[in-house]
Structure formats: structure tokens, C-alpha cells
Amino acid sequence: MTTRPPRFEPLGDTDPFSPDPVRPVRVRARSMPADTHFEPHRHPWAQLAYCATGTLRVRALPEAERLEELTYIVPPSRAVWIAPGQLHCIDVLEAAQFRTLYLHAGVTPAGWSGSRMIVASPLLRELVQALDLAPHPEREALLARLVLDEITHADPQALAVPMPHAQRGDKRLRAVCEAVLRTPAARTTLAAWAADVGASERTIARLFRDELGTSYQQWRQQAALAHALPLLAQGASVAQAAAATGYASESAFSAMFKAAMGQPPSSFQGR
């Protein structure tokens, strides 16, 4: 008999973990098996999702005011911010000690709309753990203020893979993006991808800038990281991850990975 992966619905407004003006920062810690899926949902509070161990995939889904879908692969050293009202879903790629902060909309940092990835510093992780165990309201309030301050000052990490809107984006750009994601090991040039969809290299390069706000090379790096992290977590070697993401050498892949993630790829093997 086939076992269906766990699926979870969003919290309701009356859930005991829901934040409010008196307790604006709440912590929920859970152990989640691989393939756990949280259905697309939104809620009136903000959320910061990360894992003490394991790997998550968080997707910020397109809506009327946004033309692209953003996919984040989240190792333990990173966390994803989801603003109040943002439609999103979460998949557990590898068994995870899942940590979720729910933050009342009233304490959302100025300008933090939509979604973003930040570095989950050792201090932030320790503060979250302490907040989860805080026995007294006074200590909880103090820790909540420190958590908010650490989030506000966290280093941003551009580790999302943006996609053009399926209906309103340029179909040629969407076709190139989907082709790269389907064949991450291909070393195809942008000129060749452009020719496949009946456009010039210059046109596709312009569309990457205009619709996704990035160059093709930067977008390709994000796609490579998104593909490599789960492979490494499942025990693949650095050489295998490099080959699977189209890098000609292990050293080139490792240099790119460390610059983006702050740690060498070997640090993520077998997590």
C-alpha cells in the first residue's frame, strides 16, 4: 500500500500559535518527515520559516500584483520571510526540524513586503530556541524584541529562482526558464536557448532584465543552487552536484556555491 505524504492546512485565527498585539512573536517547532506538504495558503501575520536540520522548499506564488513565482531552497543557514497576506506553500525536501516564527502584522519591518531570504545567524537560531522555551511573559517579551531586531538586521540572501508569469510574462522567456530547470546539467549557451524559442540572444537577455530583474547568468546560478542543495542533502558528492548542475569542474562549482551560501558544498552533504 502506498503511503501518501503528510499534507497540512494553514492555521486559523484562533489557533493557540497565532500572534497578537500582546504576544506579537510566536514560535512553533515541529519535526517534519520528507515530502511533507503545506497547501497554498495565506494568513494575516508574517512568517519566518527555517529548519534546524533538513531542507525546505518555500514557494511564493504569483498573484495579481506580482508577475513571477519565487522558489526558495532553504538549508539550515537560511530562512525565508513571508509577508502578511502573501500566498505561499512549503514542501519538506528532507526530514526537517522545522522552526516557524509567526509575527503580528504590526511588527513587520518597514518595507518588508512580499518574500525574501535572509541569513539565519547563530544568534537568531539561539534566540528562537530560547523564545520557544520562555516560561515567563516578561522574558518572552524581551526575547521577542531581540528576535525582531536580529531579523531586521539580518543579511539578505538572494537565493530565489524567479519565474515569469505563466499568462502575462513573455512566453519565450518562460520557455527558456522551464527548459533550464528541466535540464540543469545542460551547458547550453543563452544564444542556443534563444534560438530554440525563435529569439535572439540579445532579446532574451533583455527579457531577463526587464521581467525578472536579473541577468541570465545570475538566474542560472540561482537555478543551479536550487537543484544542487537537495542533491547534496541526499548524499551526492560535490562532483556529482557540479555535474548535475552543468559545471565543468568541481572547483568552479564549489567557488560559486561558497560565495552564494557562505559555506562550501561539503557542509551540506548528507544533511
Image: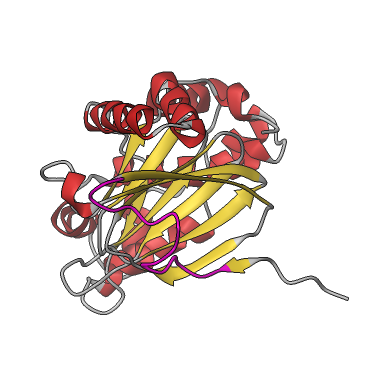
Tell me, yes or no, whether the highlighted magenta stretch contains residue 18.
yes
Along the line of sight, the residue nearer the viewer: 140 or 260:
140
On whether residue 115 falls in the magenta region, the answer is no
Residue at 41% of width from left, 58% of height from top?
59
Seen in the image, is 50 located left or right of residue 165?
right
Where in the figure is residue 76, as x and y percent of width and height? Answer: 52, 33
- Taking depth in this image into account, of 157 and 1 the one nearest to the observer is 1
Q: Residue at point 47% right, 57% down?
A: 181
Q: Is residue 178 above or below residue 143?
A: below
**Residue 130: horizontal and vertical position, in percent?**
47, 27
Does residue 208 show up? no
**Looking at the image, can residue 41 be seen?**
yes
Q: Is residue 184 left or right of residue 202?
A: right
Q: Count all numbered tags in the image, as a single digit.
A: 0
Q: Image check: 208 left or right of 57?
A: left
* Place of residue 74 in the rendered image (x, y in percent of width and height, measured from the top left): 48, 42
Q: Residue furthest left?
A: 110
Image vertical order of residue 19 relative to residue 143, above or below = below
Q: Quadrant of the C terminus?
A: top right
In front here: 47 or 61? 47
| Residue found at x 29% / y 26% | 146
- Whether residue 222 is situated above or below residue 166 in the rendered picture: above
Task: Provide residue 211's location: percent of width, then percent of height.
Answer: 18, 60
Magenta part, dominant SS = loop
Q: Is residue 138 left or right of residue 238?
A: left
Q: Residue furthest bottom?
A: 167
Identify the residue shown where x is 70% and y is 41%: 234
Region of the chain picked out in magenta, as a range: 8-23
Q: How is the image coloured?
A: secondary structure
Please identify the quarter of the rendering in which residue 15 is found.
bottom left
